[in-house]
């Protein structure tokens, strides 16, 4: 039973904040992937039109894109840690019935690890 000072809106605000940070991190990861693969696009255009593009476009775009992917992954990881710490401070009566405190944090960590795996993939497939 909720006490008079209990406010479930605090919990739901924390959940919305976590989701917003995950969306932000995923957007940064997607931008990084696009930047990393832009060098391939430039090479294809130069081959199509027989123009000479400097050899630096692919490694530069891959490095910059990988940096974006890493920043996005770190964003998701840090938001998961902060959310986990905040939810741990809430009393049980402020949480929804049968809510697992660890599920949202675990899923966020999985997204962060997949982002790191994508960064590794981008580095390993650099041509």
Image: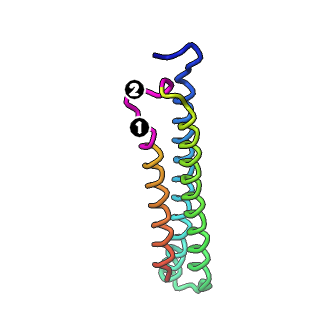
Above or below — where is 63 with respect to 53?
above
Q: Give the side of residue 58 with respect to residue 99, left or right.
A: right
Q: Do labels 2 and 1 touch, CB within 8 Å? A: no
Tell me the element at label 1.
loop
- The quadrant in which residue 58 appears is bottom right
The residue lying at 51 percent from left, 58 percent from top is 30
Q: Residue 6, how many percent across, how many down?
A: 55, 19
The residue lying at 54 percent from left, 54 percent from top is 77
The residue lying at 55 percent from left, 63 percent from top is 69
Q: Give the side of residue 75 with respect to residue 1, left or right.
A: right
Nearest the eye: 94 or 17: 94
- For the view shown, which residue lies furthest in the top direction? 4
Q: Quadrant where the N terminus lies?
A: top left
- The quadrant in which residue 86 appears is top right
Give the distance between the C-alpha atoms of the residues marked 2 and 1, in whole angstroms: 9 Å
Q: Residue 64, how many percent across, how many down?
A: 61, 70
Tell me the element at label 2.
loop
Residue 114: within the magenta? no
Q: Residue 34, how many percent across, how many down?
A: 52, 64
Q: Which mark is residue 100?
A: 1
Q: Which residues are magenta?
A: 93-103
Q: Which secondary structure is most common in the magenta stretch? A: loop
Residue behind mark 2: 97
Q: Give the side of residue 120 with respect to residue 82, left or right.
A: left
- The crowding category of the residue bearing disc 2, from other C-alpha atoms within 10 Å (few below 14, some 14 to 19, many at least 20), is few
- The crowding category of the residue bearing disc 1, from other C-alpha atoms within 10 Å (few below 14, some 14 to 19, many at least 20), is few
- For the view shown, which residue lies furthest in the left direction? 98
Q: Which mark is residue 49?
A: none
Above or below — where is 15 with respect to 50?
above
């Amino acid at each position: 039973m909720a006490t008079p000072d209990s406010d479930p809106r605090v919990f739901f605000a924390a959940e919305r904040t976590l989701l917003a940070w995950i969306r932000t991190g995923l957007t940064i990861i997607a931008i990084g992937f696009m930047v990393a693969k832009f060098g391939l696009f430039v090479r294809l255009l130069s081959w199509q039109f027989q123009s000479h593009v400097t050899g630096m476009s692919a490694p530069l775009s891959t490095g910059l894109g990988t940096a974006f992917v890493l920043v996005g992954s770190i964003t998701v990881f840090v938001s998961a840690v902060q959310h986990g710490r905040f939810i741990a401070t809430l009393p049980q009566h402020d949480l929804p019935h049968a809510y697992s405190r660890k599920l949202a944090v675990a899923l966020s960590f999985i997204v962060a690890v997949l982002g790191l795996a994508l960064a590794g993939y981008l580095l390993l497939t650099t041509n």
